[in-house]
Structure formats: C-alpha cells, structure tokens
Image: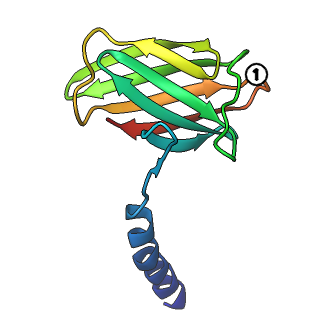
C-alpha cells in the first residue's frame, strides 16, 4: 500500500512540472532546445527553416560535418526535409510556407558523432 501511495504522489507532483516545460528563446528570437550537446534554435521565413547551432554560451558553432533532417507535420500533411549545413546553420526548404502551429522535429548528428532529436512548434 505504501508503494502505491508513493508512486501516486510522485506522479501527481511530477505532472505539473512536466506540463510547464517552456522553450527557451534563442538569440535570433526563435524557440531553442538542447540536442546532442548543443543548443539548436529554429527560425522560419516562409518556406525556409533555419536551425542555428549554438554552444552553452549561445555562441555560433560551425556545422561542418553535421548531418540533419526535419520532419514537418501540419494537420494530416507530412514532409521530410534534408537539412544542409552552412556556416553555423542547418537549412531546409519546404514545399510551401510553414503553417502556424505546425510541428517540426529535427534529427541531427554532430561532427563528433553525437546524435539527438528535438521537437518545435511554429
């Protein structure tokens, strides 16, 4: 009985904390997440998705040797974009302007071989 109460109380206190996850704002004004040991900030301009790669101090990191893709989901529409490394960013072009509220998941692998995923909302 004590185990059940312990588990139940843990879930009750953990649920609000998990629900309050807030995306950090990056230096370019977009949402930012930690992925594979770096910060990734997403910005959108029409059909172009740009992921800015930053270190812990929010300074730009070279994306040489990185590989990445993004999955866009808007309603029942899905599109996978290969992302191209360019300087300190990873960029991709969608078929159409990214809809407000669309979900964007990025999968990336760093030059050091670390990999990870993050989810953003436009």
Residue at (43, 59) in percent of width and height = 21
Front residue of 67/60: it is 60
Give the colour scheme of this rendering.
rainbow
Give the labeled residue for mark 1: 111
* Above or below for 76 versus 15: above
Q: Quadrant of the C terminus?
A: top left
* Above or below for 107 versus 29: above
Choose top left, top right, bottom left or bottom right for residue 89.
top right
Left or right: residue 86 compared with residue 73: right
Q: Position of residue 78 (x, y in %)?
A: 30, 19
Q: Which residue ends up furthest to the right in the rendered image?
A: 112
Front residue of 114/8: it is 114
Q: Position of residue 79 (x, y in %)?
A: 34, 16
* Above or below for 22 versus 118: below
Left or right: residue 63 compared with residue 26: right
Residue at (29, 18) in percent of width and height = 46
Q: Position of residue 60 (x, y in %)?
A: 66, 32
Residue at (44, 69) in percent of width and height = 17
Q: Position of residue 12 (x, y in %)?
A: 40, 78
């Amino acid at each position: 009985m004590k185990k059940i109460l312990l588990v139940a109380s843990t879930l009750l206190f953990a649920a609000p904390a998990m629900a309050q996850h807030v995306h950090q704002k990056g230096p370019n004004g977009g949402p930012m997440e930690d992925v594979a040991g770096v910060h990734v900030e997403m910005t959108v301009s029409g059909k172009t998705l740009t992921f800015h790669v930053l270190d812990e101090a929010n300074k730009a990191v070279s994306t040489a040797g990185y590989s990445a893709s993004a999955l866009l989901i808007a309603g029942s529409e899905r599109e996978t974009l290969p992302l191209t490394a360019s300087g300190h960013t990873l960029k991709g072009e969608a078929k159409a302007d990214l809809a407000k509220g669309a979900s964007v998941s990025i999968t990336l692998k760093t030059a050091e071989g670390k990999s990870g995923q993050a989810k953003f909302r436009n």
